[in-house]
Structures are given as structure tokens and as C-alpha cells.
Image (cartoon, helix red, strand yellow):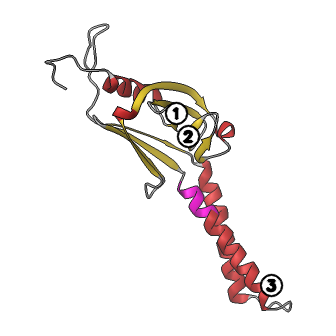
Amino acid sequence: MRDHPHGGHVPHPDVWTGRATNRVQWLLALIGAACMALGIELAVVSAWESGIAALAMAVVGCIAAGLLVLFGTLAFVHVALKVDRECLEVRCGHIGVPRRRIPLSHVAGAEFAPIVCPRHWGGWGYRWRPEKGTAVVVRRGEGVVLRLWDGHTFTITVDDAEAAVLVIKDRLRPKAPGTAH
């Protein structure tokens, strides 16, 4: 364990990473998988007397709803935030899309938000609200609010958001001439 002088500057890592996870969305993914299974079962073992059109609509509807729910929830089970010397990158889900890369030269400031609530943004996911800006919300809790030079804001739910804000603010400060970075 290192002792740092009181009030001294503690250097941040070259690349700061953080993430937030929402385990409740796994339940929604299971519901989506169940809808798909129902559609497949209807297609394989069903003998509807109402006609083939009704059967086809039921099968396609169940499979489409299941895929939509399954992939929509898996895309926002977690969010990963990476801050390096030049940019900030946000990646969602297991595939990493949607993804947003924001150069630090476009960031005017960063603030800690103690509570970012999906209810205030209209649910989980990649959200835009005219009065609030854009957000990636995967769970209720702390987050980072970026103020961009173009007047927009971008909010990300992430664990240890205070540390992320400190790293971002440190990287936004102009370096004194002659200092190494």
C-alpha cells in the first residue's frame, strides 16, 4: 500500500475502464427466448384448423417478438466505458454495439451524477430526450454526465463514476509547458 502526500496529485492510469451491469435484463432475455421457442413449437407441432394464414402469423409474430426482446435486452445487459489520453469510448452489450467514441477535444466538462434512473430516460438502452440529451442507461445508479462543446450532454451509467469524472477532468486540464504527459 502506498502513502500519497496529503493534497498531492495521484496519477491516473493511462487507460481507465469501468462498466455497469444489469442482471434483471437477463430475465427479459429469457422471456424473449421463450417467445421464440413458442413460435418454433407452433410451427413444428401445431395443426390449426383455422388455416395456414393464422398459423403463419402466430409463428412469425412469436419468433419476431422473441428476437426483438432477446437481442434488445442482450445489447444493454452491460455498458463498458474506456477513457484513454485522447478519447472516451462507450460500448454496449456483448458485441459492443451500439458504440460511441467521443474525442476528449469535444468534451467541455464532466460531472458526477449520483442517480441516473431509467424511468427518467424512458427505460433502459441508448436514449435521447430533447431536454436532457443522450444517454446509455443500463441500470439505476451513479453515472457520468459529459458536457460537449456543441452544447449537447451525454450520460453513461457506470460503476465508480466519480473516478471516471476525475480521470476525464484531469485529461481535460491543459498541461503546463515542459511537463511530460
Q: Residue 22 location, x and y as percent?
A: 56, 46
Q: How many residues crowd mark 3 within 10 Å: few (<14), some (14–19), many (20+)?
A: few
Identify the main secondary structure in magenta: helix
Amino acid, disc 3: Ala
Please, is residue 108 above or below residue 134 in the view?
above
Quadrant of the image occupied by residue 16: top left
State yes or no: discs 1 and 2 in contact (Cβ < 8 Å).
yes
| In the foreground, 113 or 179 | 179
Residue 70 inside the magenta-drawn segment: yes
- The magenta-colored residue range is 69-75
Mark 3 or 2: the one toward you: 2
Q: Is residue 33 visible?
A: no
User: Looking at the figure, which quarter contains the N terminus?
Assistant: top left
Left or right, 104 with respect to 62, comes to left
Residue 11 inside the magenta-drawn segment: no
Residue for point 29% across, 26% down = 12
Q: Residue 155 location, x and y as percent?
A: 52, 35
Q: Is residue 119 visible?
A: yes
* Mark 1 or mark 2: whose residue is earlier in sequence: 2
Mark 3 or 1: the one toward you: 1
Quadrant of the image occupied by residue 179: top left
Q: Furthest-top residue in view?
A: 6
Query: What residue is disc 2 on?
Result: 134
Query: What residue is disc 1 on?
Result: 153
Left or right, 5 with respect to 149, comes to left
| In the foreground, 70 or 119 | 119
How far, Cα to Cα, is label 3 from label 1? Answer: 47 Å
